[in-house]
Amino acid sequence: MGILYLVATPIGNLEDITLRARRVLREAALIAAEDTRTARKLLTHFEIATPVTAYFTRQYGRGNPAPTPKLEMILSALARGDVAVISEAGTPGLSDPGYELVRAALARGFRVVPIPGASALTAALVASGLPTDQFVFLGFLPRQKSARRKLLQSVADEPRTLVVYEAPHRVRASLDDIAEMLGNRAICVARELTKVHEEFLRGNVNATREHFAAHAPRGEFTLVIEGKTTAASSEQSTVNSEQWNDARIISAVRALMAAGVARTEAAKRVARASGRDRRAVYKLAMTNDE
């Protein structure tokens, strides 16, 4: 009877793979990979010739999906030898395929062994500068705005640090929803972890929104968000008030209008960057129009 190994692979820098991971990948009878193209690049680099099969699911730990032909095939392979599961990058099972396979393997009496290694979750958290003693991992935020806002609202009073994954094309929208649902909290945006263009943006939510209003988000993102605290809420309110007082609001709207942006659009952009209500920004700009 084989062992199901959950093998962590690099999230960017290939040097982050462990010696144990390389050995297990070489000795396994089969590798089940979320993305076979990425897997073959990794295996070729380390001269590992183990057979690879695709194993992909979007369940990510929710629901109780019925066994699929591929899941049954992997379980059959386990009866003959060891199987190593790898995700596209990082630790399998964390917002990646693996959960239902682990449950099925355990239900049939197979041993499941983790091979620890790279993880965007822990890498971003420990370098964020935010509390690490307790945290809540939310995985990828929902694609739909209403579902995303509902999830954020459900953790609005959570005092522990929040960690989420996000795709580059949804970062701006998610930051807007975070600002509205959670407020202008401290945040660390970790981008392209362990890669050449690794970047950490530390500050508050509104400052981060302002940054990405001017710079197109690129790469893979992990957001580490401060939990709710009375002291933090008071401090953030003061910071927001100082950074985006009425004078700055008016100045920002006028600067955009001088550059040819329509008043309505200018008010919308400034509202997004400042965290202020769009109608209030428009009214303030109208009232103080020269």
Image: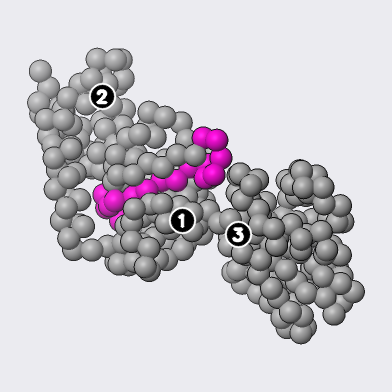
Quadrant including the C terminus: top left
Which amino acid type is marked by label 3?
Gly
Q: Which dot, 1 or 3, sits closer to the camera?
A: 3
Q: Are marks 1 and 3 in contact (CB under 8 Å)?
A: no
**Residue on which disc 3 sits:** 117
Q: Is residue 166 in sight in this rendering?
A: yes
Mark in the foreground, 1 or 2: 1
Q: Residue at x 35, y 34 (%)?
A: 211
Q: Which residue is mark 1?
A: 164
Q: Which residue is mark 2?
A: 263
Crowding at dot 1, Cα within 10 Å, few <14 / some 14-19 / many 20+, comes out as some
Which quadrant of the figure has residue 214? top left
Distance (Cα) linking label 1 and label 2: 35 Å
The answer to the question of whether label 1 and label 2 lie on touching residues, with beta carbons closer than 8 A, is no
> CA–CA distance between discs 2 and 3?
51 Å
Quadrant in the rendering for residue 265: top left
Q: Residues within 10 Å of mark 3 (few under 14, many from 20)?
A: some
Whether tag 2 and tag 3 are in contact, CB under 8 A, the answer is no
SS type, badge 3:
loop
User: Dot 1: what SS?
Assistant: strand
Residue 59 appears anywhere in the view: no
Does the magenta portion include 26?
Answer: no
Q: Which residues are magenta?
A: 180-197
